[in-house]
Amino acid sequence: MKDADLRLQFGSVVRSAVTGRQYRVGEVLGSGGFGAVYRVTHVTGDTPLPGKCVLKITLEVGAWHREAYFGELLRGTPGIVQVHESFAWVPRGGELKPLYCLVSEFVEGGDLIQHLREHSEPWTESKARREILRLLAPLRLLHAAGLVHRDITPRNVFVTAGRELKLGDFGIAAQRLGKQEAKANAFAPWFAPTAIKEGKTGAWLPADDVYHLGKLFALLLCGIEKSRLTARHVKVLTCSAWAKAIIQRCIGKRQRRFANAAEMLKALQSAPSDGPAKRSAVRSLEGKRVVFTGRLKMLRKKARMLVKRAGGISQTKVTRTTDILVVGEQSPHWKAEKKGQKLLDLDHEGERGHRIAIITEQRFQNLARYGNRRQS
């Protein structure tokens, strides 16, 4: 593909033979192997479009057809860049090859990488969770239809003026046919799961799209662009243990991830609350079954004694009867990208609809002291 074939003159007009709309060409927004992208303004046509739009042109009919198909499939769905129309256009004179055009909405804030570079600050947990839920809505529809996206990267997630996220560019999305999985032959290596990047698997599963969403969740919470993100990075995020557990599951080994967008959506919708301070509604240890995980500042024996004195019951495992999980500091034996069994069991119980309160050791000590005062 030659750049000259895709070069449009500033101020020139592109006309859709499908709708009759005409678009005046503005600045170049980007170019590459996919084609070229221009900011355009809709100037005439039966159905006016609001404000500025984006015109993507390419000579590759396959990628154009895929993106047009998915744009139509998801039209009106929140969380995606809306595609207004697609058409083939032959420049005046007809001497050049047809240009395949896609007109979509213009998202004011640019892509997520641009946003993070310009506004280098963490998003609140509630805001980040809400925006990941927004992206999961269209992805759930794709997965239910046997499709995978393969390109949910910060370059392909756009930020509106109201700081809402929208997923764009379905040019490398793929169909899963029967038992045959989509191939991992088109993806962004810098943001892909390790097993795919290193060629250990040739298939791209819905769980690999989930990996992308987990990384995006973490990027929003840390507020800076990171090409490499491991469970060790997740550990130091300023967010609840619940949010960290969600992210660790997403970016861990494929067999431990949420299998698809529907599973991740369900887990995010069952959040204990919108922040660490409000995460637990626990007011007393009395009658509660308590489990400890991580490294505590006090001896476990003393912690169990405090539970007993406060009228609670200590457990060694997270089960369907557990009420409270007390999370201490990370164990020195903890390995990157490996979650402890109690946190895995916590995820499992959450998926079954069993709510378990997550509290810090300090909160536990406060509850224990309060319980002891009541009984004395």
Image (cartoon, rainbow, N blue to C red):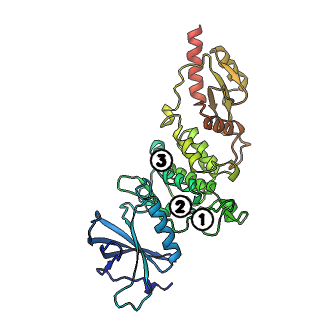
For mark 2, give the secondary structure.
Answer: loop
Residue located farthest toward the top when viewing the structure as drawn? 376
Q: Looking at the image, is 253 positioned above or below residue 82?
A: above
Q: Are marks 2 and 1 in contact (CB under 8 Å)?
A: yes
Front residue of 203/276: it is 203
Q: Quadrant of the C terminus?
A: top right
Name the foreground residue: 177 vs 307.
177
Pointers 1 and 3 in contact (C-beta within 8 Å) = no
Mark sitting earlier along the chain (1/3): 3
User: What is the spatial separation of the Cα atoms under label 1 and label 3, in whole angstroms?
Assistant: 22 Å
Query: Is 219 situated above or below 183?
Result: above
Pinpoint residue 69: horizontal percent, then vertical percent: 48, 66
Q: Residue 84 placed where, x, y %? A: 37, 65
The residue tagged 3 is 128
> Which sits in the foreground, 155 or 22?
22
* Residue under the image location 59 percent in, 63 percent down: 175
Mark 1: few, some, or many residues within 10 Å (few <14, many ≥20)? few
> At numbered mark 1, what does the secondary structure look like: helix, strand or loop?
helix
Which amino acid does the dot numbered 2 rest on? Thr
Residue annotated with mark 2? 153
In the shown orientation, is residue 216 left or right of residue 109?
Answer: right
For residue 313, side relative to residue 45 (left or right): right
Mark 3 lies on a secondary structure that is helix
Residue 253 visible? The answer is: no
Say what amino acid the circle numbered 3 marks.
Answer: Ala
Query: Dot 1 corresponds to which residue?
Result: 190
Q: Residues within 10 Å of mark 2 (few under 14, many from 20)?
A: many
Q: 333 or 45: nearer the eye?
A: 45
Q: Are marks 3 and 2 in contact (CB under 8 Å)?
A: no
Q: CA distance from mark 2 to mark 1?
A: 9 Å
Task: Say above or below: 296 vs 256.
Answer: above
Q: Please, what is the three-letter code of the amino acid marked with disc 1?
A: Trp
